Image: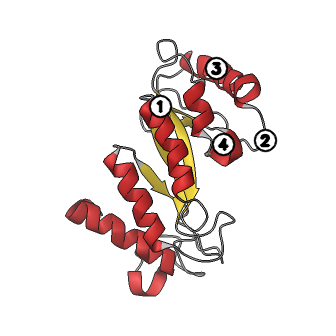
Amino acid sequence: SAYGNCPNIIFETFNEPEHQDWSTVIKPYHQALVSSIRTKSQNLVLLGSRQWNQRLDEVANDPLDSTRYTNIAYSVHFYAATHKQWNRDMVQQAIDKNLPVFASECGLSEANGNGSIDEREFNAWVDFLESNSIGWVVWGVDDKEESSAALKPGASPNGGWVASRDLTPGGLAAYNLIRSKQGDKVL
């Protein structure tokens, strides 16, 4: 009710289901919530899958009815130092079935938000996503003391960041990649 008329709102019905079954638990839950959202809004709704939004292979075998459930996309999450080609292969199964996909969370670190940064694998993911016209959003623009954070601890909460001073190695790599893809379009 509060946000149904806001065109810039994206709804997400179940972020990162962990061990629940797609067909008997997650999918029916999405169906119920999308139906409820549609009484107030026609905005995009993101749908998570088992194993922290990674099992798009299961979604590909049993998607929501696209004639009944419109303006939806299946969410994928990946962290480049953990999720490799095997994960892209699962996403490819959804692409092969013409299902809409959106990478609503991704990063260069390990899946736990810390550890190593894998810039090469992140570039492979972005190339894969963009070659399939899939949008992606990097996690997270925060100054938490971990590898997935884009900002160094203590960076201003008000923006105005200087890349060499305020961005972490992962944040700088994501920034440089976005700049290389978008050029002067990035603010």
Residue 143 visible? yes
**Going from the N terminus, do you reach mark 1 or mark 3 first?**
3
Q: Please give the residue where the numbered disc 2 appears in the rendered image.
A: 19
Crowd class of label 4 (few under 14; some 14 to 19; many from 20; radius 10 Å): some
**Residue 177 position in % (x across, y down):** 35, 68
Q: Secondary structure at mark 3?
A: helix
Above or below, 31 against 60 in this view is above
Crowd class of label 1 (few under 14; some 14 to 19; many from 20; radius 10 Å): some
Label 1 and label 4: CA atoms lie apart by 15 Å
Q: Which mark is residue 140?
A: none
**Going from the N terminus, do you reach mark 4 or mark 3 first?**
4
**Residue 161 position in % (x across, y down):** 42, 77
At horizontal 70% and vertical 21% (from top left) the residue drawn is 28
Q: Secondary structure at mark 4?
A: loop
**Which label sits in the foreground, 3 or 2?**
2
Q: Please give the residue where the numbered disc 3 appears in the rendered image.
A: 31
Q: Secondary structure at mark 2?
A: loop
Q: Quadrant of the N terminus?
A: top right
At horizontal 47% and vertical 20% (from top left) the residue drawn is 70
**Which label sits in the foreground, 4 or 2?**
2
